[in-house]
């Protein structure tokens, strides 16, 4: 049945995901920008479907986008694919200018390589280790604060590739802060980023595809506790 | 090495890098494929120039491409930039034209960056970790890349088909180091029996005119490892 889906699914776009993943949500936002309809298939990562295993045999992870029967994996790669395939729909997610495109890709990679690790460390540790991670995270956040400059979004007046890549911070950080009881992104230290987070979360297409935050909190809480008890 | 040409202006295209860096090699191969005249600014091993620190303050790493003074960092991002800027000068495209083809090549390029550099660091002794494990993981990765080659090449010479493309550059830039660590660690990674297509491709890639003077010989890299052993250990602190 799953194999048949892969061959016959020529017309309708499919997205394999889980409700809680910020990488999946990122793809939903992009598809929303383009106004593309798709079938969402919810995966159980403890019991992965044959379709997922066939479509992403290397990593066995979500999100996976299936377009005309062919799978695409890795969220930022999926974003570029969406922008490529549906370049005439909605608006362009990546800039047209090659230098600006390179910058968009650079800052998106920065988020993954330089920002996410200290934030994760801050969330999953305590004491001195956590303090050091907090400092490291703030150092990188300051870099982003400068990149954002006076713009409403990283993409300018509207959201673009960097906003989509980093956007999940806008709902994840407040939950982390609530669980730990310490603020990371305050409006006095990070006025621009704070405004960006608020502005991003206020967008209708973003709100429409947020995971249920009340369900996320206990999930994240459990993750923190698991790490602290090691 | 002066970066001012005869008209007194700095060269339009400059690469801040080092001959031994596979990431730098990627950029140089891409520029050579496009026939772009450029200037190499070789960093001294163990020292970072003011120019490097200014142009890549976030990572302080090579390569950096300076195009009319504007810096671009991250080797694969630079390769895409080169492909886009010099798209219509008659040289073949580096990335495939179709969106799915691009996504597949980007996927494997990311996989290569996740799997190959860490393995090389362990096998050349820069990081004190289990060498057998690292060799095993590299072999598994190369096995996957063997399958990727079959999928992407569609029976042709390179991952990119008739011409060298993005994925050829992404993996090919590591061939010098892969062969070097084979010697240093006494392991066989590009085994003709296990990865026949990759092994044959490796020879073709290294002999290509845009590559032959860029990706260093294994022996040179072995010597480099010996010469800079302490430095390589100091900068490669395991995470």
Image: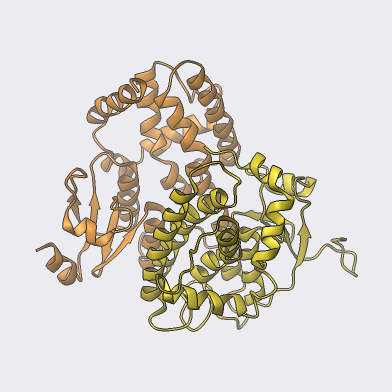
Chain colours: A orange, B yellow
Quarter of the image for the N terminus of chain B: give it.
Answer: bottom right
Residue B77 shows up from this direction: yes
**Horizontal placement of A51 versus A151: left or right?**
left
A122, B168: nearer the viewer: B168
Q: Residue at the left extreme?
A: A1
Residue under the image location 31 percent in, 55 percent down: A31
Counting from the top left corner in percent of width and height, residue A42 is at 18, 48
**Does residue B222 appear left or right of residue B118 in this picture?**
right
Placement of B130 over or under A195, stated as above or below = below
Horizontal and vertical percent position of residue A9: 18, 68
Q: Position of residue B139 (x, y in %)?
A: 43, 60
Question: How many numbered dots are placed on residues in this image?
Answer: 0
The residue positioned 49% from the left and 78% from the top of the image is B200
Residue at image location 39% in from the left, 56% down from the top: A79
Rendered location of residue A218, percent (x, y): 25, 25
Q: Quadrant of residue B92?
A: bottom right
Q: Which residue lies furthest to the front in this view?
A: B186
- In-front residue for pair B161/B9: B161
């Amino acid at each position: 049945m799953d194999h048949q889906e892969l061959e016959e699914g020529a017309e309708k776009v499919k997205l394999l995901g889980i409700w809680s993943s910020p990488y999946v949500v990122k793809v939903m936002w992009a598809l929303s920008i383009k106004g593309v309809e798709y079938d969402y298939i919810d995966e159980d990562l403890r019991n992965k479907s044959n379709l997922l295993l066939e479509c992403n045999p290397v990593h066995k992870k979500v999100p996976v986008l299936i377009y005309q029967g062919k799978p695409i994996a890795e969220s930022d790669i999926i974003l570029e694919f969406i922008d490529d395939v549906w370049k005439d729909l909605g608006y362009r997610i990546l800039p047209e200018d090659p230098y600006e495109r390179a910058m968009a890709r650079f800052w998106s990679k920065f988020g993954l390589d330089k920002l996410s690790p200290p934030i994760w460390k801050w969330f999953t540790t305590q004491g001195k280790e956590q303090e050091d991670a907090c400092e490291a995270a703030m150092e990188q956040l300051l870099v982003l604060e400068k990149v954002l400059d006076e713009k409403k979004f990283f993409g300018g007046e509207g959201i673009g590739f960097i906003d989509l890549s980093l956007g999940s911070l806008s709902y994840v950080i407040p939950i982390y802060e609530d669980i730990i009881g310490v603020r990371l992104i305050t409006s006095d230290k990070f006025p621009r980023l704070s405004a960006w987070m608020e502005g991003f979360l206020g967008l209708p297409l973003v709100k429409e595809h947020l995971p249920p935050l009340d369900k996320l909190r206990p999930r994240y809480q459990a993750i923190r506790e698991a790490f602290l008890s090691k | 090495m002066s970066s001012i040409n005869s008209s007194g202006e700095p060269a339009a295209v400059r690469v801040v890098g080092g001959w031994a860096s596979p990431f730098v090699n990627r950029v140089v191969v891409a520029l050579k494929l496009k026939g772009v005249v450029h200037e190499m600014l070789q960093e001294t091993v163990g020292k970072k120039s003011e120019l490097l620190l200014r142009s890549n303050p976030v990572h302080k790493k090579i390569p950096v491409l300076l195009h009319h003074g504007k810096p671009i960092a991250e080797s694969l991002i630079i390769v895409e930039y080169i492909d886009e800027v010099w798209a219509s000068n008659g040289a073949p495209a580096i990335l495939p034209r179709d969106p799915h083809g691009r996504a597949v090549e980007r996927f494997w390029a990311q996989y290569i960056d996740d799997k190959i550099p860490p393995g090389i660091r362990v096998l050349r002794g820069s990081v004190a970790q289990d060498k057998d494990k690292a060799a095993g993981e590299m072999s598994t990765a190369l096995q996957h890349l063997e399958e990727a080659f079959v999928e992407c090449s569609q029976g042709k010479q390179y991952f990119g088909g008739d011409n060298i493309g993005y994925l050829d550059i992404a993996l090919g830039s590591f061939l010098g180091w892969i062969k070097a660590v084979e010697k240093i660690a006494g392991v066989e990674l590009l085994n003709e029996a296990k990865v026949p297509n990759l092994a044959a491709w490796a020879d073709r890639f290294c002999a290509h005119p845009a590559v032959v003077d860029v990706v260093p010989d294994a022996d040179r890299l072995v010597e480099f490892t010996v010469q800079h052993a302490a430095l390589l250990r100091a900068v490669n602190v395991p995470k």
